[in-house]
């Protein structure tokens, strides 16, 4: 009975933390005008409220994942939840933008500690024949958090102000902390190998990820962004070289060298996350500007994708315990590619019913891909490397979002120049939509072969 309660607690903590950390990544999107007004700052400054959280999450996830693999993941997890909860509460009392950004950095650090351990603990707590099923719950919570952020955050901001977003987050996080601290089982000490930390590797990794992500996301700003991106690439090359020589590397390159499937599955995840992110963005533009819908109605239609994914994910995860997870994820990627291909043929007269059907198809593809792909990734590594493996996967999600939006922005600039979306001609918007959806459909086709390239 005690064992069942412990496992239930593991699932609960994993689901709640997967939801709340991704929720905070987008929950403030509709609060930007209110933040500008309250702190008397420019839109560019307020954009850092969103950016700095994502940069911190991505850059610190792998270092904390390796730390969790070498000490005890449970401690890293509940410390991360505690930091996340306290920083959320601190943000409520922000009197200036400086303090608020500092709170967001601490939120990002707490979230990176969570990202690096919650999946590893979840996978480690269950036998292999249950792994896919429980990953389905966690994956579902991640996508629901990503999708619910703008909707729930907008509602809270409109009715109670932007501080209410942080109050709600702090309360939910505090509950999750109590469950994690008192109910999660301790891991056996023999599961963790204590080795000296690779301090230089940690610093190089953090610097390279920050430079890469910021450089990619700000490419449209010109030469300075190209310099930052180039510096990120150079520092990442130095990081790879140093890790190949280090005695106790942050990332053991054997994971990639001896098991190419691990790299390919992570790249497939990056493509899938990025394609889904861009799809939601471009459809939002299409529904509001071309179809003339309100933001509320457009949001309701777009929820179709997440709703189908949320319902099917646990079942698809469970199915991956019986069938090849890589084949299921390849099938899921195929459905995502098919939905993008259908959207590449959108016209100004496309029916709402067809859009909803295609979104449902995409949601089914996401459900088929996400949990099975995570299952396949975690199956590629030993138990002692679960933390760094799940951290790399979460970093791929952030890199997928940034690189996909940078690519979409470049295409928008190519076809629309400096015109705003609202003032652009419908024909130029539709051309842009067609090109972007066609490109990401092609990338997803490439992702199919990455996902299925696994010996099982």
Image: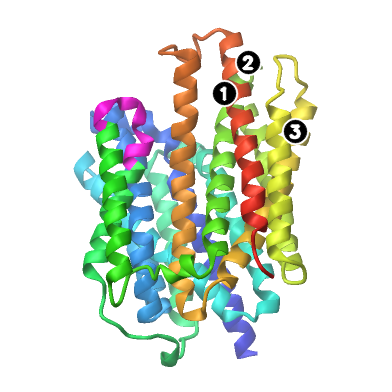
The tag earlier along the polypeptide, 2 or 1, is 1
Above or below, comparing residue 29 to residue 64 in the picture: above
Q: Which residues are magenta?
A: 214-224
Marks 1 and 3 close (CB-CB < 8 Å): no
In terms of depth relative to the viewer, which is nearer, 249 or 284? 249
Q: Relative to residue 285, is residue 352 drawn left or right?
A: right
Residue at 79% x, 28% y: name it.
Answer: 353
- Residue 216 covered by magenta stretch: yes
Please rate how many residues cluster around mark 1, counting C-alpha atoms within 10 Å: few if below 14, some from 14 to 19, many from 20: many
Residue for badge 3: 356
- Residue 285 — which label? 1
Q: Relative to residue 31, is residue 227 drawn left or right?
A: left
Here the colouring is: rainbow
- Under circle 1, the secondary element is helix
In terms of depth relative to the viewer, which is nearer, 262 or 55? 262
- Residue 290 — which label? 2
- Under circle 3, the secondary element is helix
Residue at 73% x, 59% y: name it.
Answer: 327
Q: Relative to residue 256, is residue 12 drawn left or right?
A: right
Please rate how many residues cluster around mark 3, counting C-alpha atoms within 10 Å: few if below 14, some from 14 to 19, many from 20: some
Q: Quadrant of the N terminus?
A: bottom right
Residue at 33% x, 67% y: name it.
Answer: 244
Give the CA separation, mark 2 to mark 1: 8 Å
- Under circle 2, the secondary element is helix
Which quadrant of the figure has residue 48?
A: top left
Q: In x, y percent, where is residue 377?
A: 57, 65
- Residue 100 covered by magenta stretch: no
The tag earlier along the polypeptide, 1 or 3, is 1
Q: Relative to residue 456, is residue 100 drawn left or right?
A: left
Q: In x, y percent, where is residue 134?
A: 64, 69
**How many numbered circles does the render carry?**
3
Give the CA separation, mark 2 to mark 3: 16 Å
């Amino acid at each position: 009975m005690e064992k069942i309660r412990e496992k239930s607690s593991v699932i609960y903590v994993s689901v709640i933390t997967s939801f709340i950390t991704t929720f905070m990544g987008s929950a403030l999107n509709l609060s930007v005008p209110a933040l500008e007004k309250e702190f008397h700052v420019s839109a560019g400054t307020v954009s850092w409220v969103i950016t700095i959280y994502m940069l911190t999450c991505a850059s610190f996830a792998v270092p904390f994942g390796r730390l969790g693999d070498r000490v005890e993941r449970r401690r890293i997890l509940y410390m991360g939840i505690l930091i996340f909860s306290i920083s959320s509460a601190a943000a409520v009392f922000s009197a200036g933008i400086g303090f608020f950004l500092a709170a967001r950095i601490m939120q990002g650090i707490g979230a990176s500690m969570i990202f690096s351990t919650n999946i590893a603990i979840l996978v480690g707590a269950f036998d292999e024949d249950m792994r896919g099923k429980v990953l389905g719950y966690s994956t579902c919570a991640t996508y629901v958090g990503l999708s619910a952020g703008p909707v729930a955050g907008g509602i809270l901001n409109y009715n109670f102000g932007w501080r209410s977003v942080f109050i709600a987050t702090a309360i939910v996080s505090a509950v999750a902390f109590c469950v994690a601290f008192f109910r999660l089982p301790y891991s056996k000490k023999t599961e963790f190998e204590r080795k000296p930390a690779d301090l230089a590797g940690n610093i190089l990794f953090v610097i390279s990820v920050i430079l890469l992500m910021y450089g990619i996301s700000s490419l449209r700003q010109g030469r300075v962004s190209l310099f930052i991106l180039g510096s990120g690439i150079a520092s990442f090359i130095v990081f790879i070289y140093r890790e190949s020589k280090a005695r106790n590397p942050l990332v053991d390159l054997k994971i990639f060298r001896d098991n190419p499937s691990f790299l390919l599955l992570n790249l497939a995840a990056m493509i899938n996350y990025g394609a889904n992110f861009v799809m939601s963005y471009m459809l939002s533009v299409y529904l509001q500007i071309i179809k003339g819908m309100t933001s509320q109605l457009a949001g309701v239609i777009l929820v179709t994708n997440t709703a189908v994914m949320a319902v099917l994910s646990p079942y698809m995860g469970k199915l991956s315990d019986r069938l090849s997870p890589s084949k299921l994820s390849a099938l899921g990627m195929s459905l995502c590619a098919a939905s993008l291909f259908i959207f590449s043929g959108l016209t100004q007269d496309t029916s709402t019913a067809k859009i909803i059907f295609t979104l449902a198809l995409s949601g089914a593809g996401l459900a088929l891909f996400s949990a099975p792909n995570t299952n396949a990734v975690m199956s590629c590594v030993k138990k002692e490397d679960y933390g760094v493996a799940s951290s790399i996967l979460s970093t791929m999600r952030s890199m997928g979002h940034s690189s996909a939006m940078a690519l979409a922005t470049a295409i928008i600039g190519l076809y629309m120049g400096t015109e705003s979306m609202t003032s652009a001609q419908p024909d130029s918007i539709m051309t842009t939509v067609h090109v972007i959806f066609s490109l990401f459909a092609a990338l997803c086709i490439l992702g199919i072969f990455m996902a299925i390239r696994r010996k099982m």
